[in-house]
Amino acid sequence: MITDLLDYLNNNLLIAHYCGFDISASLPSYWTFDRFLKQIDNDILSSIMISQVLYLSKQGMIDASFIGLDSTPIAANTSQNNPKSFFSNKFKPDNQPKADADCKLGVHSASNQTNEKNYEFYWGYKNHVLVDCISGLPIYELTTTANVCDSTVALDILADTHTFLPITECTFLADKGYDVKNIYNQVHELYKGECIIPLNKRNAKNPTLLPQGNPICEAGLAMWKDGKFSDSGRTRQKFCCPLKLSKNADCPCHHQNFYNGKKHRGCTKYITIPDDLRLSIDRDSKYFKNNYSLRTECERYNSRFKNTGQKRMWVRNKSSVTNLNTLAHISLLAVAVAAITSDTRQSYRKLKAVKRIA
């Protein structure tokens, strides 16, 4: 990528002059650019990105009413990510790639189908991007190693964003990887907003329920309520076998739990009572579905981000990866800034159109 940049600047000295280079002398070498990527403080690049976001917000292009958070996998520059590699146990956590000592083992979905469980392991990083779901432009980004769970950085990203762009009364959209109770509570309490996130059932079983809410046991009998209790901040309703206190009855299906003695006789089931924000959302409503459809802007932006060459890295350290990711976002925001400056707002996401204007 640096080689392509040098070729472009050498063949377009006027552009090199506008970039601040002294065209009367030789341009910086490959290794100078390489050191720059590794050594520059990412806070400098982040401040440039923030200034772009604030400018676009002032121009009415970026709005924080509907914001979506998503992460995109970034493969490290190592042979262990090559599908044709015959390296034994290449995706074991102990087999750290020698080419990149900073990358970590992660997993990402290899299918867009919600009913398919197709995953792929990779060594690398993640780029977490907060996107304005109306304009499809980035607001904030964070690069982590691939082993970092998406939900663990969500609140930090929202807090950092709120310091320069208020997200009060926002609608926060994300996939089910962010379906964590703490996120719902923080968005509601700190920002007076709401979350539009699908429910992650986490392999939970859905028992057959009567209209009154009582589950049906394996013998086809309606189970009885047997008290409530609190567990990890959740209120759970306990149900027991209806024949538990019977002296002469026998289980119709002869379930093994029925013969555990009088004190522990019969089956028990537990149902979480929806008394929190996470479980109180009607995810089958038209309101939820219409708002959640806006999250596709996150996918569209991630696609444009990957087209800048960020799908697989050519550098081999986290510092360079982080800076390259930020530069990619700056470049895509620069397209929107150029579109506004040239009075062609309809081209704020079209790189080719802005190039023709230039």
Image: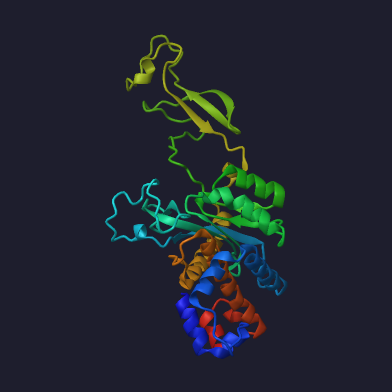
Q: Which of 25 and 68 is in front in this view?
A: 25
Direction left: furthest residue: 86
In the image, taking residue 268 as reference, residue 230 lies left or right, namely right
Residue 271 picture location, percent across and down: 51, 32
On the question of residue 301 being in view, the answer is yes
Residue 73 picture location, percent across and down: 46, 59
In the image, taking residue 254 as reference, residue 51 lies left or right, namely right
The relative height of residue 234 versus residue 259 in the rendered view (above or below) is below
Residue 110 picture location, percent across and down: 38, 57
- Number of labels in the image equals 0
Q: Which residue is drawn at 50% across and 64% down?
A: 299
The relative height of residue 289 versus residue 226 in the rendered view (above or below) is below
Choose top left, top right, bottom left or bottom right for residue 336: bottom right
Q: Which of 6 and 72 is in front in this view?
A: 6
Choose top left, top right, bottom left or bottom right for residue 333: bottom right
Q: Residue at x 64, y 86 (%)?
A: 342
Q: Residue at x 42, y 9 (%)?
A: 247
On the question of residue 358 being in view, the answer is no
Q: Which of 33 and 18 is in front in this view?
A: 33
Choose top left, top right, bottom left or bottom right for residue 357: bottom right
Residue 152 picture location, percent across and down: 56, 48
Tell me the quarter of the image containing the C terminus: bottom right
Q: Residue at x 59, y 71 (%)?
A: 330
